[in-house]
Amino acid sequence: VARSTLIERSSSKMDSPTFQRRARALSTDEGRQVLKSAKERGVIVLGCGAYCIGSSVEFDWCAVSCIRQLRRDGFKSIIINYNPETVSTDYDESERLYFEELSLERVMDIYERENPNGVVVSVGGQIPNNLASSLHDSGVKILGTNARDIERAEDRQQFSNMLDTMKISQPQWSVLQSKDEAVEFSNKVGFPVLVRPSFVLSGAAMRVAADETQLKNFLALAADVSGDKPVVVTKFIEDAKEIEFDGVANKGDILNYAIGEHLENAGVHSGDATVVLPAQKLYVRTIKQVKRYAAAIARALRITGPFNIQFMAKGNEVQVIECNLRASRTFPFVSKTLNHNFISLATRAMAGLEPAPYKISLLDIDYVCVKAPMFSFTRLRGADPTLGVEMASTGEVACFGQDQNEAFLKAMLSTNFNLPKDSIMLSIATDEKRFEFSESALALVKLGRFKLYATPGTAKYYKEHLNLDLTVVQKPTDEADDGAGTALYEIKAGNVDLVINISDGTIRKDEITSGYLIRRASVDFGSSLITNVKCAVELVQCLERGMDKPGAFVPRHIADYYEIPPVGWTLK
């Protein structure tokens, strides 16, 4: 009885307002001391390393934004990076700069010397992200998402298993055990299929295989790149739209997000794609499903910090492609478009500061921003200037506009794309793509300003279906096939301002060969080149609206767009 009475008295004391106030004060004081110690010990931020295709200034922007936010919040900032071209290695950007390689040994040496509160691996791209598991196993405190959850997302097999368990839709997949099993799976689901290595940047060794021969060749390449990590073969969904979801989460709850859409269909690497933000042509149902899947994945992986999920949608069916638990190359693009720094928000979440989300309504933004890629094909002799699932671009430009057409054309012009003045050549390999370009072909004829060349199959299709008379030029069979009346002759003679060459969907060797020769000649002899039908259609829409005429655009400062009132809101 005495013991029971003692427990009751103790319980009543704990429930008293005085006790609660003292407990909160002690807890708050302890929390302040912990935070003060964390700030004094500092945070190590791993940079992006050497610039290469797939890892460039966009990741350095993320690292610098992270460092600056840490300093604003009072944390000692320590950067490890070995690239003198970066802003993060400027002497005044951090309290400590270690100009060292991004390897486990060097990071551990610095970690033991500095004894920081933790390490940020999620703002420098794939190189530091790949160190998460080994650093965690060595006793390093990883700030943000747990290293085990990072591995669950990066490992194709683990991630696909997780999606299956959660009943989240994804393309049919199989883990490579042998080439024979991969061939059997591919024949079962039907070609084309996508070969996907794990833990790689910029889609290295990722390929779309259209037949067994290509599949076997691509599997060997993927196995070399992926090492001991799994290689997954998935069904490739044709004519699907690809969607980018960039977000910041805290303990599994999404704070802010942005949904952008690729202008090109799925099958073009996100670094090479033309990205539209906010998305302009997605069904409301599609957007809702993307948000549901993203929220479920964020909870399952207990995400704290930046992340990127890539989706594909065909009709209203949404499927998950992959998830990266790090900043993506579109984070600067998203942050500039929305005028809110997503990395600053992610940094506060990773530092344990309980950040408040930004007030953003994507549907109410009354302007559009388009990101277009830049390529260096003129400096890469013999390279095929076309788009695919492995990244090839060496830069990108983003431009604002009142609508998608305006933003798209500004972005294209900013990549040094020259608009056609007098002549355009059409070379489209399949009837499906010819049909998709039909309205645009009619529009070009109606404009009456361009001499239109076409290869035999393309000219025949538009004559039979639209009664269009195009100037026929013969397709080349080799580099020397450049006599009068051939496509190469007209390009080399400077008679063609723009070449629209669409080889998607064909596996005919003669089409592939002639397409490459036409594309390569366009680059080598200064003709503008478009290799995607969606981009070609968008460009023709711009020409129809007269956007190529002098004075069509009035230069505007970026702040002018930020000051445009959101749709449906009245500013007081």
Image: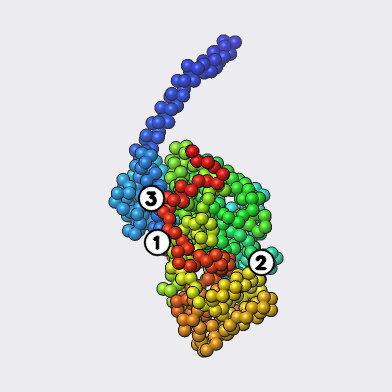
Measured from the top left, where is residue 531 in percent x and y? Answer: 54, 71
User: Which badge, 3 or 2, is on the more N-terminal residue?
Assistant: 3
Rendered-image quadrant of the N terminus: top right
The amino acid at mark 2 is: Ser
| Closer mark to the observer between disc 3 and disc 2 | 3
Q: Residues within 10 Å of mark 2 (few under 14, many from 20)?
A: many
Query: Is disc 3 placed on a helix, strand or loop?
Result: helix
Q: Which mark is residue 51?
A: 1
Q: How is the image coloured?
A: rainbow
- In the drawing, does residue 522 fall left or right of residue 48? right
| Most distant residue in the left direction | 91
Q: Is disc 2 placed on a helix, strand or loop?
A: helix
| First of labels 2, 1 by sequence position | 1
Q: Residue at x 49, y 67 (%)?
A: 548
Give the residue displayed 58% in from the left and 80% down from the top: 454
CB within 8 Å, label 2 to label 1: no
Indicate the amino acid at tag 3: Val
Q: Position of residue 3 (x, y in %)?
A: 56, 13
Check the image and name the residue furthest to the right.
188
Label 1 element class: loop
Relative depth, front residue between 354 and 96: 354
Q: Position of residue 495 (x, y in %)?
A: 49, 81
Residue where numbered disc 3 is placed: 64
Question: Which residue has dot 2 on it?
Answer: 186
Q: Quadrant of residue 212?
A: bottom right
* Residue 324 appears in the figure: no
From the viewer's side, name the closer residue of 261 and 411. Answer: 411
What type is the residue that disc 1 sits on?
A: Tyr
Where 186 sits versus 146, above or below? below
